Amino acid sequence: MTPSLPGPSASLSGIRIVPDMPICQQDLPLDWYQKEFQPYAEEYLALPDRLPETVLPWMDRYIHPALDHFGPSIMLLAHYYMGGEIVKLVERYGGRIGDSYELALQTRERPEVTVFVESAVHFMAEAIAILAGEHQDVWITNPRSGCTMEMMAKEHMVEPVFEDLRARYGDDLLVVAYMNTSGRVKALAGKTGGSVCTSSNAKSVVSWALGEGKRIFFVPDRHLGEVVAGWVGIGADERFIWGEEPGTRPSLADLSARERERLDGAKMILWGSYCGVHTVFTPEHVEYWRSRGYRVLVHPECPTSVVALADGAGSTKFLWNEIREAKRGDRLAIGTEGHFVRNAAEQAELRGVEIVNLADIPDPGFGEMGCGCATMSRNDPPHLVAILDLLRRGSPPDLNRVLPGDVVNETTGSRDRLTEEGRTEIVRDARMSLERMIEVVSRSG
Ligand code: SF4
């Protein structure tokens, strides 16, 4: 029997679970689940297949009682990049799908909700927790779901450089922290009167920072930073990349006299991190599809050489809107996270629009490119089922609760949690930087 599905939601409007398409691309090994989740994972792994007609009744058995128990006080959230069919599953159970900006605003937009359950990466859940009211709790289905870009910009890496730069430039320095940072790094931005940004508003936020007459320290994505610098007119010779070589993080003392001179002349200092998913795209990919009549659209986390050649670049939301507005017969090559492109391609096909992944080239010369954000895909059906059932029973693992300032080791799963005093400080400073972004966005319309 094909399970009945709800109508279109506000966010993905019409995304649906295809009956004969497997629910999940890949099963995780049992020992990747925390011990409280293993009984659920064992049941899931024992199911005969991953087809919706098998998996959905199993999920319903746990999820419907949990949703009935909490009623309107619970909200499920997921990011567009979630792997397999998880975005569709979250949507099926009445949840909200969004980009990181939309997800972060949910505690404010839905004050009646007291329990948020997020299926995405940790920094996104933490941003939700930073803006949450005291009556609202945030839970993540898998705390080990990290972001590789954020992992290359942990507080212990960024703070020493931040302190060096503060000592050199004083109040002239303003930090713009991309949403893909921990709360502790967002708090550094708040300390300088700076702001958070997302890819959908980075241009407005950087323009605002320039208008303040400050020297910008942009953390952590050098590619987004460089793309936005180009958009707002900051030339290549006015940028300084901190740690050009991946994995190298010099201190101020390591810089040569010439490098210091360049640093002093820079309007924008960019932390040298990047997204492993978006940096697989190359100018050759763009040329390949363009020469075959495809319009190429990319995310600005792609290298600048790719963005410069593409027909358009913008946030996840921008890409989604472009895909939705495409007309029958249009052909688009999209350079962003693979699960998003796959979901978009399925939906677009129903409207006669052809979508391909920019890196998915049927030519052995190009090699295999991988499918998407592997860390985000650590959230799967057993994780969603387990956290909801354990919440209903009143025994959720504390590791899945997300508080501002939490730092989770993505490999071991261990967590460093601040004292209440430390947390209060982080909330104050990080909230300031998030609120600055909200203010800039609302001013720029
Ligand atoms: S796609 Fe890249 S930037 Fe986004 S969460 Fe995954 S690793 Fe991080």
Image: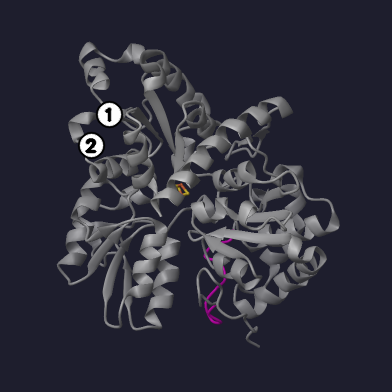
In percent of width and height, residue 170 lies at: 40, 16
Q: What element carries label 1?
A: loop
Q: Is mark 2 on a helix, strand or loop?
A: loop
Q: Is residue 265 left or right of residue 432?
A: left
C-alpha distance separating marks 1 and 2: 7 Å
Amino acid at the residue labelled 2: Ile
Residue count near mark 1 (Cα–Cα under 10 Å), binned few <14, some 14–19, many ≥20: many
Residue at 42% x, 61% y is 317
Amino acid at the residue labelled 1: Lys
Q: Name the residue under label 2.
A: 234
Q: Do the residues labelled 1 and 2 touch (CB within 8 Å)?
A: yes
In percent of width and height, residue 294 lies at: 22, 70
Front in this rendered view, residue 283 or 370:
283
Residue 267, disc: 1
Q: Which residue lies furthest to the bottom in this view?
A: 1
In percent of width and height, residue 335 lies at: 32, 59
Q: Is mark 2 within 8 Å of ligand 1?
A: no
Query: What colouring method underlies this structural image?
Result: one colour
Residue count near mark 2 (Cα–Cα under 10 Å), binned few <14, some 14–19, many ≥20: some
Whether residue 179 is visible? no
Whether residue 316 is visible? yes
Q: Is residue 289 left or right of residue 146?
A: left
Q: In which quarter of the image is the N terminus?
A: bottom right
Of helix, strand and loop, which mostly describes the magenta segment?
Answer: loop
Asked if residue 238 is positioned above or below residue 276 in the image, the reply reads above
Asked if residue 3 is positioned above or below residue 254 in the image, the reply reads below
In percent of width and height, residue 339 lies at: 45, 63
Residue at 62% x, 52% y is 108
| Quadrant in which residue 355 is drawn | bottom left
| Quadrant in which residue 406 is drawn | top right
> Which segment is the magenta one?
17-27
